[in-house]
Image: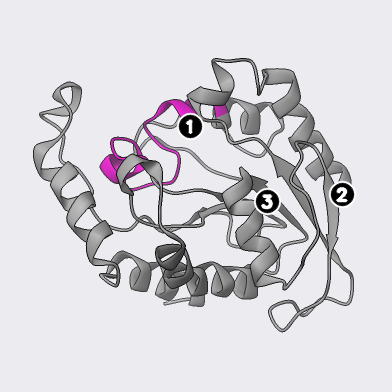
Amino acid sequence: MNPLGSLNQEIIECRKCPRLVAWREEVARVKRKAYKDAEYWGKPVPGFGDAQARVLVVGLAPGAHGSNRTGRQFTGDASGGFLFPALHRAEFANQPQAESKSDGLILRDLYISASARCAPPDNKPTPAELNTCQPYLEREIQIIQPKVIVCLGKIAFDRILKIFALRNLKFAHGEIYSLPSSSLTRSVHPSSLICSYHPSQQNTLTGKLTVEMFDDIWKKAKSLL
């Protein structure tokens, strides 16, 4: 098995955070009424996409009835319903829909990961849980060696700052920062960090994040490549 495949298998088998294990499994057992006949994934959700990607997308955590149900990042919920059409328009995805792991979705030059791999209560992982999960993200960066990292939301942004030991950078939608070389990156050329609001409904339904604003993020990512 290749390094990314081995890492993903390790993520799927993880039971390091008792609170998250209990919550994700309870959600998978009780289910939402709309998905009462579905078989929930109910485990940590690994990253997915192009193993040779130059763009790494980092989100927050699996949605209780989205990724925790389907087993694939941003798949089966409203956030993914906003993300994947944008990736399709930017030609990072072969289709705008993401409903299940067997829906034929293929990502090109892009890999999607997360700050936490288990669905957390109230969508809020604790700092300790994020710290426990961080080595998985570090290893993904080390394996993929992305040229551009797109952070969806401030929690993902803060996690990348911690990994790269950066301070005094402020989160602002559309902001671009240079990432220094580190023990994780082999390239002599600095990679770039792009900040974006998370495509959650609390941002998209309120107009805090519009289609045009989100499309601009992926245009910036392509220009940096």
Q: Is residue 68 left or right of residue 6?
A: left
Three-letter amino acid code at the position of disc 3 = Asp
Q: Which residue is mark 1?
A: 80
Q: Which residue is mark 3?
A: 109
Three-letter amino acid code at the position of disc 2 = Leu
Q: Is residue 18 above or below residue 78?
A: below
Q: Which residue is mark 2?
A: 224
Image spot of residue 208 (x, y percent): 65, 21
- Marks 3 and 2, how far apart at CA: 13 Å
Q: For the residue labelled by badge 3, is the local secondary structure a helix, a strand or a loop?
A: loop
Q: Nearer the viewer, residue 203 or 216?
A: 203
Image spot of residue 155 (x, y percent): 57, 51
Quarter of the view holding residue 66: top left
Q: Is residue 205 above or below residue 169?
A: above
Region in magenta: 63-82
Point out the residue furthest to the top here.
206
* 79 part of magenta stretch: yes
Residue in the image at 64% along x and 15% along y? 207
